[in-house]
Image (cartoon, rainbow, N blue to C red):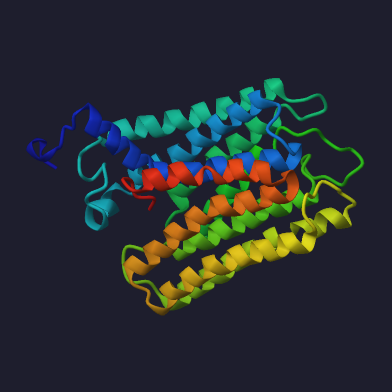
Amino acid sequence: MSSESVVHPTGSSRTAAYLRLFRIPNLFTAWADILMGFLVVHQGFTPLQPLVFLLIASACIYTAGMVLNDVYDIEIDRVERPTRPLPAGEISLGQASRVGYLLLVVGVVAAAVSGVWAPAGAMAWRGGCVAFILALCVLLYDGILKKTPVASWVMGACRFLNVLLGMSCAVMVVRDAQVGGYLPHEWMIAGGFGCYIAGVTWFARTEARVSSRWQLAAAVLVMTGGLLMLAWFPVVMTDAGRSELEMPPNIVFLLLMLLGATIIYRCFLAVCEPIPARVQVAVKHCLQSLIVLDAAVAASVAGLQSAVMVLALLVPMFVLGRWFRST
């Protein structure tokens, strides 16, 4: 690109370019994971200090993933998405790289700092450890594995780890069977979201061109598996003798299956007509539905009032979504 063709935006347009680069509407799905995970282990939003630092950590690492995704995809975007901030010259490649890597570091540090306020009996180091692994997964996906068959599962692992990050500041309950300090139903919730996002990522893999119906259908099956895991976690809790549920397990199952049916229906329309417009609409709906799914899980363990606070993240997501694309 010649120097004459490079766009040099003003302050306000540069800010807008960064918000587009960050895919800012999607950030609220990452925060919903953190709030939901925190509610699962605390049934409330206290202690507040570690929650704030976990939200900062998640925001930084998620945004870094968006930035570095475009950094590594610059040549492809010049052909398929020439209006994105980097190929359009609104932000230089060097600037974006520095911002992306700095955000990763800040995210890991913020997660480690959250352990300072961890309650007695908690694994204070766990947040920093989970965030470090999450940052590595972001780098592996963006820089190495994106074009490989395991790419969708690595993206799913990122969402899985983000949920575990929200659950990281919890007191260990010695009498219960645990792995890494996490209870079985906590692993199932995180796994359900991870599996769901793996399916969404696979579904969106060829969103810029006509997709294969078989690929889309297989991705929908993976999403469905994740939704079933989320619907089944109350059964795992009750079988283990846990009594934190605010709703009967059968009500939680029906609620999550109803939400899942609306998601799968949108995806089914794209399978029937796999053109970019339909696939992109389905992907956007899947991402927006993450907040609703997080709120449903939060309602089942912490009550409707807490769930409404998670659901409120839809407001800034929809408002910002009017100006900034989420895909």
User: Residue shown at 59%/35% (left/top)?
Assistant: 131
Residue 223 image position (x, y, % from top left): 57, 65
Residue 8 visible to an observer of this rendering: yes
Q: Position of residue 37 (x, y in %)?
A: 67, 42
The extreme front residue here reads 305
Quick check: 119 left or right of 227? right
Residue 306 quadrant? top right
Residue at far top of view: 116
In the rendered image, the quadrant that contains the N terminus is: top left
The residue furthest right is 175
Does residue 308 sit above or below 81 in this rendering?
Answer: above
Residue furthest to the left in view is 4
39, above or below 292, in the image: above
Residue at (74% x, 47% y) in the render = 301
Give the quarter of the image for residue 102: top left
The answer to which image quadrant residue 132 occupies is: top right
Depicted 220 relative to depicted 323: above or below: below
* Residue name at image x 77 percent, y 43 percent: 182
- In the image, 260: left or right of 277? right
Judge left or right: residue 92 versus residue 272: left
Residue 175: % across, % down: 92, 41
Q: How many marks?
A: 0
Closer-to-camera residue (184/32): 32
Residue at screen point 75% across, 34% down = 170
Residue 148, can we see it?
Answer: no
Residue 162 in picture, x, y percent from top left: 59, 43
Is residue 241 or residue 259 the one in the foreground? 259
Compared to 219, does 198 lie above or below?
above
